[in-house]
């Protein structure tokens, strides 16, 4: 890929008024090579970004106004488009943008292109996929495990927040072949409320969330097939939980292994050597350690009594779990230094 480091790109964000869109705008407002030229929102069309998100006042994005979506206008003005749309709604828009401008770089936050096979998507999300023919143009956007493929493609499927925490937590052990896959892998994950999106719903009101803690989608969750496919392990038991905090994911993962604690630590150090956004910790990390950042903090150990390897993986669900990772993918697509715009911690919620 041509090195475009130091050159600016024009960016549009479709569905920019949700939590991921707001976080994306916060990050891009200080990105030296990104020029946000268009933002869309049905709910806030015609409103100034400063009115909807006052924290973006006095940034280079402050004069933006939410617009309606027009594919020709977006394609003409943009080099990169981020789609912050719900699952099941993104694939028709990705298709028409791709057909309008083949050189357009598209980063999709939904699950619509995350699977290798569109049939798996249809089975998981119970909807017909109308853009199967462009799957060959897509890459799964988890840079630490798929960097070379990302650089070759024009459409990036930004991973789910839960899968990001679990896959990064397990991948070194899986790659080293030290997981006994005949035993089930247990992934117990907790997420902040922003993971549910910026919407009005009784289940996510203050009185329903505060002073409470619950598991949900216990019998099946749509992220479980994504985790299993990317790890190439079928025997994964994933359970999500909702905790009364704004942002963050903590995954505690258990797997059977014959490796010692020291061997596991060595495997993880070697695999993630040189990865800026992976921080291996000597003590179990907290979600507050990564809030507002693109870091994934990982702690690995071994329970000798049970023979279980234990990994604790924490990310910011709208950082490394969404918008931060999307900017990291944009940097890879455009030939910018991978950490550009992501070197600093910060938190607007």
Image (tube, rainbow, N blue to C red):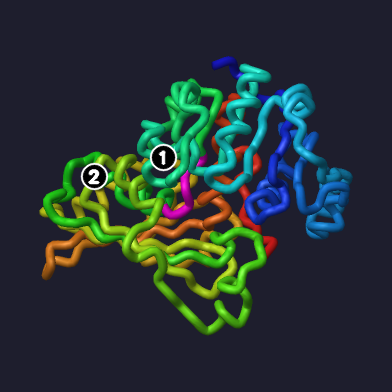
295 in the magenta segment: no
Q: Residues within 10 Å of mark 2 (few under 14, many from 20)?
A: some
Residue 256, above or below 270: below
| Disc on the earlier residue, 1 or 2 | 1
Q: Which region is colored magenta?
A: 158-162
Q: Which label was assigned to residue 255?
A: none
User: Is residue 249 toward the left or the right of residue 22 in the image?
Assistant: left
* Quarter occupied by residue 155: top right
Q: Residue at x 86, y 57 (%)?
A: 51
Look at the image and say whether residue 160 sits in the magenta stretch. yes
User: Which quadrant of the view contains residue 229?
Assistant: top left
Q: Is residue 202 left or right of residue 79?
A: left
* Residue at point 56%, 64% (across, down): 247
x 23%, y 44%: residue: 233
- Classify 22 as above or below 307: above
Judged left or right of residue 125, residue 44 is right
* Spot occupied by residue 338 in the image (x, y as percentages of width and height): 56, 35
Residue assigned mark 2: 233
Point out the image quarter for the C terminus: bottom right
The residue tagged 1 is: 122
Q: Front-most of 329 and 13?
A: 13
- Residue 282 in sight from this viewpoint: no
Kindly report the secondary structure that dominates the magenta region of the rendered protein.
loop
Which quarter shows the N terminus?
top right
């Amino acid at each position: 890929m041509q090195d475009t480091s130091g050159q600016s790109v024009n960016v549009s964000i479709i569905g920019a008024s949700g939590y991921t869109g707001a976080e994306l705008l916060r990050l891009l407002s200080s990105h030296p090579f990104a020029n946000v030229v268009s933002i869309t929102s049905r709910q806030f069309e015609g409103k100034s970004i400063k009115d909807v998100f006052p924290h973006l006042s006095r940034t280079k994005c402050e004069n933006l106004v939410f617009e309606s979506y027009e594919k020709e206008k977006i394609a003409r003005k943009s080099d990169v488009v981020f789609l912050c749309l719900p699952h099941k709604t993104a694939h028709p828009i990705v298709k028409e943008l791709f057909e309008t401008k083949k050189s357009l770089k598209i980063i999709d936050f939904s699950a619509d292109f995350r699977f290798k096979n569109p049939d798996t998507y249809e089975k998981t999300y119970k909807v017909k996929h109308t853009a199967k023919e462009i799957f060959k143009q897509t890459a799964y956007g988890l840079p630490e495990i798929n960097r070379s493929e990302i650089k070759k493609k024009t459409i990036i499927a930004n991973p789910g927040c839960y899968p990001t925490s679990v896959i990064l937590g397990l991948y070194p052990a899986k790659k080293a072949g030290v997981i006994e896959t005949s035993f089930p892998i247990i992934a117990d994950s907790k997420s902040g409320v922003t993971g549910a999106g910026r919407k009005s719903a009784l289940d996510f009101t203050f009185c329903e969330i505060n002073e409470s803690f619950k598991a949900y989608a216990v019998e099946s969750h749509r992220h479980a097939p994504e985790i299993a496919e990317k790890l190439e392990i079928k025997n994964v038991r994933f359970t999500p939980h909702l905790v009364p905090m704004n942002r963050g994911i903590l995954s505690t993962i258990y797997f059977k292994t014959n490796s010692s604690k020291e061997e596991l630590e060595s495997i993880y150090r070697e695999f993630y050597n040189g990865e800026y956004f992976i921080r291996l910790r000597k003590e179990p990390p907290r979600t507050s350690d990564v809030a507002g950042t693109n870091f994934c903090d990982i702690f690995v150990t071994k329970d000798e009594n049970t023979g279980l390897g234990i990994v604790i993986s924490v990310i910011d669900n709208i950082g490394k779990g969404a918008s931060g990772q999307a900017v990291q993918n944009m940097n890879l697509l455009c030939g910018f230094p991978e950490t550009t715009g992501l070197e600093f911690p910060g938190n607007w919620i």
